[in-house]
Image: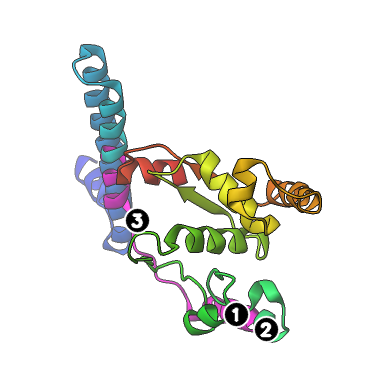
Amino acid sequence: YYITGLVDALPSAANVEHYAHIVREKYILREIIDTAYKLTTDAYEGEDDPNQLLDKAEHNLFDLARRGLIPKSVALEPILAEAYQKLDKRQSGDKKHAYSGVPSGFKDLDDMTDGFQPSDLVILAGRPSMGKTTLALNMARNAAKEYGHKVGIFSMEMSSYQIAMRLLTAEAKVDSHKMRKGTLSKSEWPRLAQAVGELSDIPAYIDDTASLDILDLRSRIR
Protein backbone atom coordinates (compact mmCIF):
# COMPACT_ATOMS: atom_id res chain seq x y z
CA TYR A 1 0.00 0.00 0.00
CA TYR A 2 2.88 2.40 0.84
CA ILE A 3 4.53 1.84 -2.55
CA THR A 4 1.19 2.28 -4.32
CA GLY A 5 0.67 5.55 -2.46
CA LEU A 6 4.07 6.80 -3.62
CA VAL A 7 3.13 6.10 -7.23
CA ASP A 8 -0.17 7.95 -6.82
CA ALA A 9 1.57 10.96 -5.26
CA LEU A 10 4.24 11.17 -7.96
CA PRO A 11 3.73 14.36 -10.00
CA SER A 12 3.14 13.79 -13.67
CA ALA A 13 5.43 15.38 -16.24
CA ALA A 14 2.30 16.44 -18.09
CA ASN A 15 1.59 18.98 -15.32
CA VAL A 16 5.14 20.28 -14.96
CA GLU A 17 4.20 23.80 -16.09
CA HIS A 18 1.44 23.98 -13.48
CA TYR A 19 3.81 22.81 -10.73
CA ALA A 20 6.48 25.27 -11.82
CA HIS A 21 3.91 28.06 -11.58
CA ILE A 22 3.05 26.99 -8.02
CA VAL A 23 6.73 26.98 -7.04
CA ARG A 24 7.16 30.47 -8.48
CA GLU A 25 4.09 31.76 -6.62
CA LYS A 26 5.35 30.32 -3.32
CA TYR A 27 8.77 31.87 -3.94
CA ILE A 28 7.22 35.30 -4.47
CA LEU A 29 5.09 34.93 -1.34
CA ARG A 30 8.17 33.94 0.68
CA GLU A 31 10.08 36.95 -0.65
CA ILE A 32 7.17 39.23 0.31
CA ILE A 33 7.19 37.79 3.83
CA ASP A 34 10.97 38.25 4.15
CA THR A 35 10.78 41.82 2.84
CA ALA A 36 7.92 42.69 5.19
CA TYR A 37 9.77 41.17 8.16
CA LYS A 38 12.94 43.19 7.45
CA LEU A 39 10.94 46.40 7.04
CA THR A 40 9.01 45.73 10.24
CA THR A 41 12.27 45.15 12.12
CA ASP A 42 13.78 48.37 10.77
CA ALA A 43 10.63 50.29 11.70
CA TYR A 44 10.66 48.96 15.29
CA GLU A 45 14.35 49.77 15.70
CA GLY A 46 13.68 53.31 14.50
CA GLU A 47 17.25 53.92 13.37
CA ASP A 48 16.35 54.99 9.83
CA ASP A 49 14.60 58.17 8.81
CA PRO A 50 10.91 57.38 8.02
CA ASN A 51 11.23 58.78 4.50
CA GLN A 52 14.32 56.66 3.86
CA LEU A 53 12.47 53.62 5.17
CA LEU A 54 9.56 54.34 2.81
CA ASP A 55 11.98 54.65 -0.10
CA LYS A 56 13.59 51.36 0.91
CA ALA A 57 10.20 49.64 1.15
CA GLU A 58 9.12 50.87 -2.26
CA HIS A 59 12.45 49.95 -3.84
CA ASN A 60 12.35 46.42 -2.42
CA LEU A 61 8.74 45.83 -3.46
CA PHE A 62 9.33 47.30 -6.91
CA ASP A 63 12.35 45.04 -7.38
CA LEU A 64 10.31 42.06 -6.25
CA ALA A 65 7.47 42.95 -8.63
CA ARG A 66 9.95 43.30 -11.49
CA ARG A 67 11.47 39.89 -10.77
CA GLY A 68 8.02 38.35 -10.50
CA LEU A 69 6.91 39.44 -13.94
CA ILE A 70 6.26 36.53 -16.29
CA PRO A 71 6.35 37.31 -20.00
CA LYS A 72 3.14 36.23 -21.67
CA SER A 73 2.70 35.34 -25.32
CA VAL A 74 -0.33 36.87 -26.97
CA ALA A 75 -2.18 35.52 -29.97
CA LEU A 76 -1.88 37.59 -33.13
CA GLU A 77 -5.63 37.80 -33.78
CA PRO A 78 -6.63 40.16 -30.90
CA ILE A 79 -3.62 42.40 -31.61
CA LEU A 80 -4.64 42.71 -35.25
CA ALA A 81 -8.24 43.42 -34.24
CA GLU A 82 -7.13 46.21 -31.89
CA ALA A 83 -4.84 47.66 -34.57
CA TYR A 84 -7.67 47.61 -37.10
CA GLN A 85 -10.03 49.40 -34.71
CA LYS A 86 -7.45 52.14 -34.10
CA LEU A 87 -6.83 52.53 -37.83
CA ASP A 88 -10.57 52.71 -38.46
CA LYS A 89 -10.97 55.50 -35.91
CA ARG A 90 -8.09 57.43 -37.45
CA GLN A 91 -9.51 56.94 -40.94
CA SER A 92 -12.88 58.28 -39.79
CA GLY A 93 -11.29 61.66 -39.10
CA ASP A 94 -11.89 61.57 -35.35
CA LYS A 95 -9.63 64.28 -33.93
CA LYS A 96 -8.88 62.35 -30.74
CA HIS A 97 -7.56 59.41 -32.76
CA ALA A 98 -5.69 61.35 -35.44
CA TYR A 99 -2.34 60.14 -34.06
CA SER A 100 -1.23 56.85 -32.57
CA GLY A 101 0.51 58.64 -29.68
CA VAL A 102 -0.31 61.59 -27.42
CA PRO A 103 -0.52 64.74 -29.58
CA SER A 104 1.41 67.85 -28.62
CA GLY A 105 -1.11 70.14 -30.28
CA PHE A 106 1.50 71.36 -32.77
CA LYS A 107 0.40 69.86 -36.08
CA ASP A 108 3.74 69.95 -37.91
CA LEU A 109 5.47 68.24 -34.99
CA ASP A 110 2.69 65.67 -34.55
CA ASP A 111 2.70 64.87 -38.26
CA MET A 112 6.40 63.99 -38.00
CA THR A 113 6.28 62.08 -34.70
CA ASP A 114 2.69 60.72 -34.83
CA GLY A 115 2.41 61.99 -31.26
CA PHE A 116 4.37 61.04 -28.14
CA GLN A 117 4.55 57.26 -28.02
CA PRO A 118 4.18 55.38 -24.68
CA SER A 119 7.65 53.83 -25.00
CA ASP A 120 9.43 57.11 -25.80
CA LEU A 121 11.56 59.31 -23.56
CA VAL A 122 11.38 62.79 -25.09
CA ILE A 123 13.91 65.40 -23.95
CA LEU A 124 13.21 69.05 -24.69
CA ALA A 125 16.55 70.87 -24.64
CA GLY A 126 17.74 74.40 -25.33
CA ARG A 127 19.67 77.33 -23.96
CA PRO A 128 18.33 79.29 -20.95
CA SER A 129 15.35 81.59 -21.56
CA MET A 130 14.55 80.06 -24.95
CA GLY A 131 10.98 79.09 -24.03
CA LYS A 132 11.41 75.42 -23.08
CA THR A 133 9.02 75.61 -20.14
CA THR A 134 6.42 77.54 -22.12
CA LEU A 135 6.56 75.01 -24.95
CA ALA A 136 6.34 72.03 -22.58
CA LEU A 137 3.37 73.55 -20.74
CA ASN A 138 1.60 74.31 -24.00
CA MET A 139 2.08 70.69 -25.07
CA ALA A 140 0.71 69.47 -21.73
CA ARG A 141 -2.26 71.85 -21.93
CA ASN A 142 -3.07 70.80 -25.49
CA ALA A 143 -2.87 67.09 -24.69
CA ALA A 144 -5.19 67.47 -21.70
CA LYS A 145 -7.65 70.03 -23.03
CA GLU A 146 -7.92 69.20 -26.72
CA TYR A 147 -7.44 65.43 -26.57
CA GLY A 148 -8.51 64.46 -23.05
CA HIS A 149 -5.24 62.81 -22.00
CA LYS A 150 -4.31 62.81 -18.32
CA VAL A 151 -1.21 64.93 -17.79
CA GLY A 152 1.17 65.10 -14.84
CA ILE A 153 3.48 68.11 -14.52
CA PHE A 154 6.41 67.70 -12.14
CA SER A 155 8.44 70.82 -11.42
CA MET A 156 11.54 71.02 -9.25
CA GLU A 157 12.09 74.73 -9.89
CA MET A 158 8.82 76.57 -10.45
CA SER A 159 6.00 76.47 -7.90
CA SER A 160 2.59 75.08 -8.78
CA TYR A 161 1.23 78.64 -8.59
CA GLN A 162 3.74 79.87 -11.18
CA ILE A 163 2.92 76.98 -13.48
CA ALA A 164 -0.81 77.61 -13.11
CA MET A 165 -0.29 81.28 -13.98
CA ARG A 166 1.62 80.34 -17.12
CA LEU A 167 -1.11 77.94 -18.18
CA LEU A 168 -3.72 80.58 -17.48
CA THR A 169 -2.04 83.34 -19.50
CA ALA A 170 -1.51 80.98 -22.42
CA GLU A 171 -5.14 79.86 -22.37
CA ALA A 172 -6.52 83.39 -22.01
CA LYS A 173 -3.99 84.83 -24.47
CA VAL A 174 -3.15 87.75 -22.19
CA ASP A 175 0.19 89.36 -21.38
CA SER A 176 1.72 87.66 -18.33
CA HIS A 177 3.51 90.86 -17.29
CA LYS A 178 0.23 92.80 -17.28
CA MET A 179 -1.48 90.05 -15.30
CA ARG A 180 1.25 90.02 -12.64
CA LYS A 181 1.03 93.81 -12.32
CA GLY A 182 -2.77 93.77 -12.26
CA THR A 183 -3.12 96.06 -15.29
CA LEU A 184 -5.33 93.93 -17.52
CA SER A 185 -7.85 95.78 -19.64
CA LYS A 186 -11.62 95.39 -19.26
CA SER A 187 -11.75 93.29 -22.42
CA GLU A 188 -9.09 90.90 -21.10
CA TRP A 189 -10.80 90.09 -17.79
CA PRO A 190 -13.65 88.08 -19.38
CA ARG A 191 -11.10 86.01 -21.33
CA LEU A 192 -9.22 85.35 -18.10
CA ALA A 193 -12.39 84.25 -16.30
CA GLN A 194 -13.32 81.96 -19.19
CA ALA A 195 -9.82 80.46 -19.19
CA VAL A 196 -10.09 79.68 -15.46
CA GLY A 197 -13.31 77.76 -16.08
CA GLU A 198 -11.94 75.82 -19.03
CA LEU A 199 -8.66 74.87 -17.37
CA SER A 200 -10.44 73.78 -14.19
CA ASP A 201 -12.05 70.91 -16.11
CA ILE A 202 -8.96 69.43 -17.77
CA PRO A 203 -7.28 66.26 -16.37
CA ALA A 204 -3.98 67.92 -15.45
CA TYR A 205 -2.07 67.57 -12.17
CA ILE A 206 0.86 69.64 -10.86
CA ASP A 207 3.47 68.49 -8.34
CA ASP A 208 6.12 71.03 -7.31
CA THR A 209 7.87 68.86 -4.71
CA ALA A 210 11.61 69.54 -4.84
CA SER A 211 14.33 66.86 -4.98
CA LEU A 212 12.19 63.99 -6.22
CA ASP A 213 14.10 60.84 -7.09
CA ILE A 214 12.98 58.23 -9.60
CA LEU A 215 11.21 56.08 -6.99
CA ASP A 216 9.29 59.09 -5.64
CA LEU A 217 8.32 60.10 -9.15
CA ARG A 218 7.12 56.62 -10.00
CA SER A 219 5.10 56.39 -6.79
CA ARG A 220 3.37 59.73 -7.37
CA ILE A 221 2.54 58.90 -10.98
CA ARG A 222 0.75 55.79 -9.76
Name the residue carrying label 1: 81
Horizontal side, residue 67 vs residue 164: left or right: left
203 in relation to 71, above or below: above
- Disc 2 and disc 3: Cα gap in Å? 40 Å
Main secondary structure of the magenta stretch: helix
Q: Position of residue 208 (x, y in %)?
A: 45, 40
Quadrant in the picture for the N terminus: top left
Query: What residue sits 59% from the left and 71% below the top?
Result: 105
Residue 211 lies in magenta, yes or no?
A: no
Image point (32%, 64%), residue name? 127
Pointer 3 local density, CA inside 10 Å: few below 14, some 14–19, many at least 20: few
Q: Earlier in the sequence, mark 3 or mark 1?
A: 3
Q: Which residue is mark 2?
A: 88
Estimate the x, y position of residue 184 in percent, counting from the top left: 71, 48
Q: Position of residue 177 (x, y in %)?
A: 58, 50
Residue position for label 3: 18
Q: Secondary structure at mark 1?
A: helix
Q: Earlier in the sequence, mark 2 or mark 3?
A: 3
Q: Residues within 10 Å of mark 2 (few under 14, many from 20)?
A: few
Horizontal relation, residue 146 to residue 177: left or right: right
